[in-house]
Image: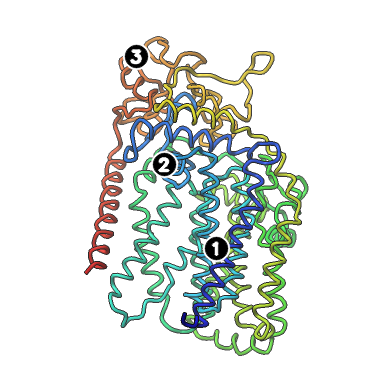
Amino acid sequence: MGMINKGSKDKILAGALGWLLIGIHYLIFSQFFPNTQGKLGHDYSYNLPLLLDGFFWFQNNGLLAVPWFTPAFCGGMPLLANPATFYFSTTQFFSFFTDPLSGVILTFILFAALGFWGFYWLLRRVFATGIWPALLGGTLFLFNGFFAFRLVVGHLEFHAFMLVPLLALLLLVPVPADQPRRIRREAGLVVLAGMLIAYMFMCGMVQLIVPSMMAVVIVALVRGLAVDDRPWLKTFLLRLALAGLLGLALSASKLAAALAFLDNFQRDAYLLPGVDGLGRLLSFIVRVLTIGGTVVTPDTELANVQWPLSRHEFEFGVTTIPFLLIVSGLAFSWRDIGPALVRLHRFKRAAALAALFLLLAVPILLNFYSPDWNAFLKKVPFIRNLSNFFRWLVIYIPFVILLAALVVEKAVLFRRFRPATVIIAIFLVLAQNLLVGTGYYHNEEYDPSAILQAYAAATKRGTPPVIANLVAPLDPNGRPFPAINRNDAIAAGNSQLLCYEPMFGFSLELFPFKNIKLGPALADSGGWLNLKNPACFLYPYENGCEPGDHFQINQRREAERFLGYRPFNFERSSVQKIADLVNIAALAGIMFFGLWIAAASLR
C-alpha cells in the first residue's frame, strides 16, 4: 500500500472531524424533536399542518402540479402566494415519503451539513486558509443559534439561512482565465447560485432574503480587503446579477402571486420595536451574538413593543469564542495593522471598506428606536410592512465567524499553535452549547400527534380526506378561542375558520370574514357557499369578485374540486400569466443546461 501524502491526510482529517461535529450538533438539538414532554415548538402548530396539507395535495396530483390554494385553513385561502409557505422545499419533499416530523429532522441534518461544509469550502477556496481555520469557521457557523433555535421553535422557513456561505462560495470562487472550459464553469456557478436564491424564496424565507444577500456582499467585501488586489469585483457583481435574475425567474410565479396577495392585505399598521439609545443597542447586539436570547429581557430593554417577543427572537449566538479570538489575535498583531491600514489608501480598498461599514450599520439603524426615526421608518416601502427587524442581525453571523477564522489564519499569535488553538476553540464552542440553559425550550407545548396520525391514516388509505366542515375551537362557554393546535383541524378533514395565519394579521384583524360561519363548507346561504373562493384573494378583478368573497352556488363543481384537493378553474392576472411563462422558461432552461453539461462531460 502506498504512502498517503499530507494533502490526503488533511482531507481525511477534515472530513472525519467535520462529520463528527455535524453528528454532535444533531445529538445536542435532537432532544427538541420532540422535547422531554413529547412536544414541539409552538410554530410547528402552523408548519406541521402545512406539511400535511402539502402531502394531501401530492397524493391527488403528483409532483408536477402546483398547489395554488388550500381548503384546510381559514375556510379556503391561497397557498403558493403565501410568502411563508414552503411547498417547494426539501422538508415538503421529504414528507412525501416519510412523516412530517421526520421530514423536519432530515432537513435539520441536511442544512446543518450544508452550512458547515459551505463555510469550510468558502474559507478554503475563496480565502485560501488552511484546514484548521476552515474547520473553525465551519464549526462556528454550524452552531450558530439562529439556525438551531429557529428550527426548534418551528420557524421552518429559516433553514435556508444555512445556504449563505455556499452562495458566497459560488459567487466568489476564482476560475482562472486560462482554465479549460472556463465559460462552462462560470455558467455552472451562476446557475447553481441562482437555484439557491430561488430556493430561499420558494421555501418561505422571504423576510431574510435581503439580509442574507447583504451578508453575501459583506463576505465579498471582506474578500476584497483580506486576500489581494487581483480583479474580483467585476466577476462577483456579474455573477450576482445573473444569479439574481435567474433566481427571480425560477420563482417568478410565487413572487407575482405573493405581490398580488400582499397588495390586497397590507400589514403596515404594526409598531416597529427597537432599543432606545445607541450604547444600549450595541450592548444588546454583542450579548445576543455571544450568548443568545437567554441574556435578553424584552420587557425592560425594548421600546415601542406591540406584540410580545420571546427568547427565540434573540437567538443569534455564535458563542464568545470568535470574539475572544479576534480581540486576542489583533492585540498581538498590532504591528501588522498599521501597514495594512496604509494600503487602504487605494481607492478600491477604501471604497470596499466604506461599503462594508455601511452594510454593517444597517441592522443598527433599523433596530435603533427614537420617535422621529421610527416615524420615518414607517413611511419607507417594505420596511413599514414588517413587525420587527431583529432578524436582520443575522447579517453579523457570517461576518464575525469569517473574521475569527481569518485572524486565526493570519495573526502571529496563532501561527505556531494553530491546530491546538482550533481544537481548544471547538471544545469551548461545544461546551458553551451544552452549558447554556435550554430548559426553556423543553416547555414548548405543541403536540404533533394529531398531524402524524392523520399522515399515517392518509398514507394507508392512499387518498386525502375531503374537507367537509368549517370549525373553530370553543371554550367551556361556547366561545371561539385561539387554541395552539387549532390548525390541526385539517387532520379530521375540516377547515379551521379561526386559523393561525399571519398574512391576515396576528389576531386575524385583516381577515374578511363576511358571511362565513361554522358548519358544512357546501352549505347554501343566499346563493353563496360557505367557502371562500381563494382566487378572489389574489385576482378579484379577473374573477369578478372582491377579496374574501365566497364561491357562488353555480360554482359548486369548482368548490367540490377545491375541497377534494383538486385543481379548479380560475382566472389569473396578465402579470401572473407572464410570470408563469417566465418561470416555465427558466425551469426549461435549467433542464437543458443540465443536459448540455452531462453531454459535454461524457464527450
Q: Secondary structure at mark 3?
A: helix
Q: Residue at x 42, y 67 (%)?
A: 170
Query: Tag 1: Cα neighbours inside 10 Å, few (<14), some, or many (≥20)?
Result: many
- Callouts 1 and 3 close, C-beta under 8 Å: no
**In the image: residue 480, left or right of residue 213:** right
Query: Tag 2: Cα neighbours inside 10 Å, few (<14), some, or many (≥20)?
Result: some
- Decide which of 380, 193 is in the foreground and name it: 193
Residue 258's label in the rendered image is: 2
Q: Is residue 111 at all visible to an observer of this figure?
A: yes
Percent x, y of residue 555: 32, 18
Q: Is residue 262 at all visible to an observer of this figure?
A: no
Percent x, y of residue 334: 69, 86
Residue 358 occupies which quadrant of the picture? bottom right
Residue that mark 1 sits on:
116
Residue type (three-letter) at the residue carrying disc 2: Ala
Residue type (three-letter) at the residue carrying disc 1: Phe
Q: Is residue 553 above or below residue 436?
A: above
Which mark's residue is nearer the viewer, 2 or 1?
1
Residue that mark 3 sits on:
553
**Real-space CA distance between mark 2 and mark 3, rounded to the nearest whole angstrom:** 28 Å
**In the image: residue 333, left or right of residue 536:** right
Residue type (three-letter) at the residue carrying disc 3: Ile
